[in-house]
Image (spheres, rainbow, N blue to C red):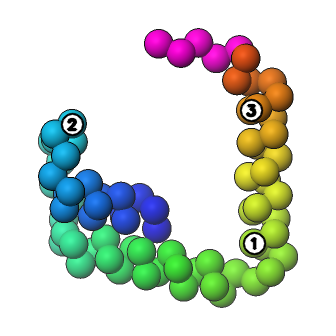
Amino acid sequence: SLENLSVIVFREADVDFYDPDFRSPGYPVLQALGVIGGAVLIVQMGRLSILGAVGITLGSLAWYLAYARSRTART
């Protein structure tokens, strides 16, 4: 969902640094359907699945902040 939304936002914003070599087929209809489809899937997943996904995301964020951030070289 977010990938499709980002394609629409970047193309419509006309930012200088965004110059893709590939043109998405069916733009913007296909991307809009992807956003809508992703939203429908999230609604239909159920509470336990959503809580599991949130738990994995929060656990990954905690691991990054506690361990990986200090070991990552920024360039």
Residue at 74%, 52% in the rendered image: 57
Amino acid type for the residue under numbered disc 3: Tyr
Is label 1 in a helix, a strand or a loop? helix
From mark 2 to mark 3, how far is it between C-alphas?
28 Å
Quadrant housing residue 12: bottom left
Q: In this view, does 10 lie to the left or right of 53?
A: left
Label 3 sits on residue? 64
For the residues carrying marks 2 and 1, which lies nearer the camera in this image? Answer: 2
Is label 3 in a helix, a strand or a loop? helix
Amino acid type for the residue under numbered disc 2: Phe
Residue at 58%, 80% in the rendered image: 41
Q: Residues within 10 Å of mark 3 (few under 14, many from 20)?
A: some
Label 2 sits on residue? 17
Quadrant housing residue 50: bottom right
Quadrant housing residue 70: top right
Residue at 78%, 51% in the rendered image: 58
2 and 1 marks in contact (CB < 8 Å) = no
Q: Does the magenta stretch include residue 72?
A: yes
Q: N-terminal of the two: label 2 or label 1? A: 2
Establish if 20 lies above or below 32. above
From mark 2 to mark 1, how far is it between C-alphas?
35 Å
Q: What stretch is highlighted in magenta?
A: 71-75
Amino acid type for the residue under numbered disc 1: Ile
For the residues carrying marks 1 and 3, which lies nearer the camera in this image? Answer: 3
Q: How crowded is mark 1: few (under 14 residues within 10 Å), some or many (20 or more)?
A: some
